[in-house]
Each structure stands twice: as C-alpha cells, then as structure tokens.
Amino acid sequence: MSFSDKVLLWLHIGFAIFAIGPLTAVTSYIPRYIRARDLNVLRFLKRAGRLFGALTLLVFLFGAVLGGSALGQVYLTVSMTLFIVAVLLLVIIDRDLSKAIRVLGNDNPDDDAKAQTARIAALGGVTALIWLVILFLMVFYQPS
C-alpha cells in the first residue's frame, strides 16, 4: 500500500468515526426532543445533522477514491449502494424534522408531531443498522 493510499485510508476511517458516529447519535436524540417539545434543541440537532451529514459524504468520497480499480468487487458495490440508501433515509429524516419543528412551533396543542417522531425513530434505527452492515463488510469481508 502506497503512502497516498495510507493517507486516504486514514482520512476515510477518520471521517467515518468523526462524522457517521455523531450523525447516528443526532438522529437517535431527535425523537426524545420532539416528545419533549424542545424547539431550541431540535433546531440545534437539525443544524448538527446537516453538518455531520455533509461530512459523511467525505467518507464516501475517500472510500471511492481508495477503492479505485476494486470498485467492481461485490462488497464495495453493496457498501456503496447501502451508503446511498442511508443518505436518502437521512434526507427523509431531515424533512420530517423540519416538519416537526414547524408543527411544534405553532400554538395548537393538538399538533404533537407523533407521526414524525415514529418515522424518524424507525428510519434512524434502519440507518444505524445500515452503517453496521457497511462496517461489517469493510472489516470482515475478505475478497477472493
């Protein structure tokens, strides 16, 4: 492995740890603060989710550059596909969070954003599982 490949691998792993980890934590906290109706925290979580979501794209970029000619390998193709699915789920979570903030911001006490809470919790859990599957593929898969 060349020096530049080692640098790319280091960046790939670093961004995975410092971007995907906090992003997963942010998505897991959202339902709790929707139920608590804490708009200030929800707005902060929305900004944090967008920041870590953007940084997460660098994981994909460095991984794709690092994969280079091996991108045709099944485990890399599956991992990249799952990554794209996870990003799409995060876009849906962001949309639902925006709607929950809007609903909780009005003065109607009947609007409690229960639908958004359930959907965000479910999609956040699925996204976390996708990250674990990708991690498994990256660590334990041995190409033949």
Image (cartoon, rainbow, N blue to C red):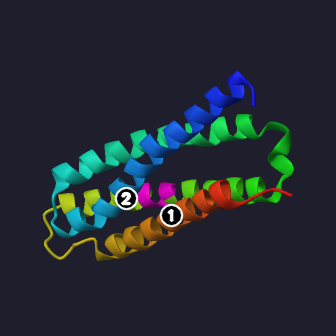
Is the C-beta separation of discs 2 and 1 under 8 Å?
yes
If the image is split into quadrants, where does the N terminus sit? top right
Q: Could you say which is closer to the camera, residue 36 or residue 12?
A: 12
Identify the residue shown where x is 23% and y is 67%: 32
Residue drawn where x is 29% and y is 50% of the image: 45
Q: Quadrant of residue 138?
A: bottom right
Vertical relation: 105 (above or below) 40: below
The amino acid type, in three-letter code, at marker 2 is Thr
Identify the amino acid type marked 1.
Thr
- The image shows residue 101 at horizontal and vertical percentages of 27, 57
Alpha carbon distance from label 2 to label 1:
9 Å
Who's the residue at 69% across and 53% down the image? 80
Q: Which label's residue is closer to the chain start, 2 or 1?
A: 2
The C terminus - image quarter: bottom right
Residue at which label 1 appears: 127
The residue under the point 17% across, 76% down is: 110
- Identify the element where label 1 is drawn: helix
**How far across and down, in percent of the image, does residue 69 sit?**
86, 39
- Asked whether residue 98 is in view, the answer is no
Nearest the viewer among 78 and 106 is 78
- Above-or-below relation of 118 to 24: below
Magenta part of the protein: which range? 90-94
Q: Residue furthest top?
A: 3
In the displayed structure, 54 sits above or below 122; it is above
Point out residue 96 in the picture as x, y percentages from the top left corner. Answer: 39, 62
- 118 or 101, which lies in front? 118
Give x and y (percent) for residue 25: 35, 56
- In terms of image quadrants, where is residue 133? bottom right
Q: Which residue is mark 2?
A: 27
- Is residue 72 left or right of 134 when viewed as pictured? right
